[in-house]
Image (tube, helix red, strand yellow):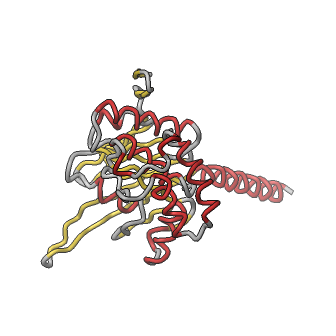
Amino acid sequence: MERLKSLLNQAVTLEFRDLVADFVNFFKMLECKNIYKSYESGGIATEVLRDISFTINDGEFVAITGPSGSGKSTLMHIIGALDCPSSGQYFLDGHDVSKMTDDELAGIRKDKIGFVFQAFNLLPRATVMRNVSLPLIYAGVNQEKREEMAGEALIQAGFDKDRYYNLSNQLSGGQMQRVAIARALVNNPTIVLADEPTGNLDSKTGDIVLATFRRLNSEGRTIVLITHELYVAEHADRIITIKDGRIQSDKKNEHRTIMQDNGKQKI
């Protein structure tokens, strides 16, 4: 009888552990496990990332920062499914991205990741609406639905409705970055990955763009922001610092800066 009780207790304990593990994994949006990345040139291998491990949960706003040459851009390429690690594992929304083929990686980029780049990467002679709709065109969405989804994304990005059919080369830098943010949102991605999103903007316009990311995060979006500027990183809830290919620190941001259209404050 005692042995039966013991076995039942073990079963309950194991089931509870499994439930806890499932609960924790439910909130994991992105996980890097012991990531290494090396490049070879002229027969010489250069190690760029060394034993990178961290988890980002659903709804987090995380900044990855570090000086030039720290490895943060290489890490961004791996997170964005633009490259694979030399060893280790990378999971995005439950998918092991580190073992995927090129076609599978393309599918992950299309369905799971919304990219925002420093240089905007808009078609200069295309309208705002067409630029935002491009991912939907490649996805085979019909025109009526494309315009509806693009309009919703532009509203989320805080873009002026009167300019939807302006050419992108008629816009200011801040307006172009809002269009780029809308394009990143249009497919309802799992994460928004922003690479130096304020790098080509003046400080005031950059503040407005950062306020947009803050608002999107408050609405439940998972944001990963890559930057070499601590001031920009301080808008996130958590800051991961990379140095010499390793994680130097990973800590909650106790002095997060909130940007608003009418000013800024630290909390």
Instruction: Give how far across and how far down residue 243 sits, in percent.
Output: 24, 48
- Determine the residue located farthest toward the left in the rendered image: 42
Q: Quadrant of the C terminus?
A: top left
Residue 258 versus residue 107 in the image, above or below: above
Residue at horizontal 59%, vertical 60%? 146
Instruction: Give how far across and how far down residue 248 sits, in percent.
Output: 29, 45
Instruction: Give how far across and how far down residue 118 sits, in percent.
Output: 31, 50
Instruction: Give how far across and how far down residue 197 sits, in percent.
Output: 35, 45
Residue at horizontal 28%, vertical 44%? 199
Residue 174 versus residue 167 in the image, above or below: above
**Relative horizontal placement of residue 50, taking residue 213 as reference (left or right):** left
Front in this rendered view, residue 190 or 123: 123
How many marks the image carries: the answer is 0
Residue 203 versus residue 117 in the image, above or below: above
- Determine the residue located farthest toward the right in the rendered image: 1
Residue at horizontal 29%, vertical 56%? 73
Front in this rendered view, residue 201 or 95: 201
Residue at horizontal 15%, vertical 74%? 44
Q: Quadrant of the N terminus?
A: bottom right
**Relative horizontal placement of residue 250, taking residue 15 as reference (left or right):** left
